[in-house]
Amino acid sequence: MTILALFAVIAAPALAGALLMYRSMFMVTRGKKIARYPEPRKALVVLDIQEGYTGTANRQPVTAPPPQGLIATVNLLIEQAAESKVEVVYIRQVFSNNLFVRLHGGRRQGRVIIDRRIKVISSNDFEKNRTDAFSSRPFEQFLIDRHVDELYLVGVDAAYCVYYTALGALQRGYRVTVISDAVKSSKALPGVLERYRRKGIAVVASDELLT
């Protein structure tokens, strides 16, 4: 057996495993349907608005230029959520440090923090390493413990992380609304939002909620 053939035999299982893991990053998670709560609550979920995407350390830009308008809109929504006793949840993307993630454009930062311009009003802060935030079991359990049955999603990137989180929520029986001027995408946003509508996900502008 040649050295090249030997390397192929050794590397094949590792390569297959890495490809499977990479593919799993872009799959909707599965979970149990939520219960019918006697007094259901709502949650505003702030997805991936973190340094490295939108902040000064913009090493992994999802949008260009940095979304100043998005920050202001999200902060207004956070303020209203607090006044309305809506749970505010922060989700941070923390990549695994492997070859396929790096090829995709991700890299694990030393300390992944929420964009400093975002108002942080709670300790409801969860990490995920896949596109769907429901890959974080603590996040999923938090919503169950708080009897949340309706989610409002804001953040980056609308074509991937926000989208797959919305699908994960639908699969579990949540009502889901995406706020159109509080999400950004590297893809054309009108087409991305139309994809939400086709899946039965509500799309509204922030002024419909802030009035």
Image (tube, rainbow, N blue to C red):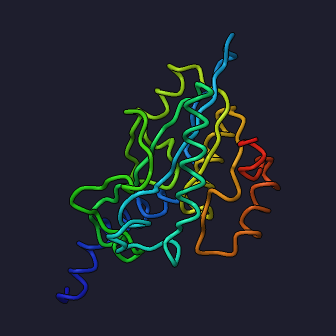
Note whether residue 15 is visible: no
What is the quadrant of the N terminus in the image?
bottom left
Q: In this view, does 183 lie to the left or right of 89?
A: right
Determine whether 16 is above or below 41 in the image. Answer: below
The answer to whether 156 is drawn above or below residue 35 in the figure is below
**Residue found 69% across the figure and 49% down from its top:** 178
Q: In this view, does 144 lie above or below 159?
A: above
Image location (x, y in percent) of residue 87: 54, 30
Q: Which residue is drawn at 64% across and 47% down?
A: 166
Q: Which of 9 and 203 is in front in this view?
A: 203
Q: Can residue 97 be seen in this view?
A: yes
Q: Give how far across and how far down residue 84 sits, in percent.
A: 63, 27
Q: In this view, does 26 lie above or below 42?
A: below
Q: List x then y, in percent, for residue 113.
A: 32, 53
Q: Which residue is at 51% across, 78% downward?
A: 65
Tell which residue pokes out farthest to the front in this image. Answer: 211
* Residue 134 appears left or right of 184: left
Left or right position of 187 against 25: right
Count of picture labels: 0
Residue 94 screen position, x and y as percent: 34, 55
**Residue drawn at (45%, 54%), measured in percent from left and top?**
130
Quarter location, residue 107: bottom left
Could you tell me which quadrant the C terminus lies in? top right
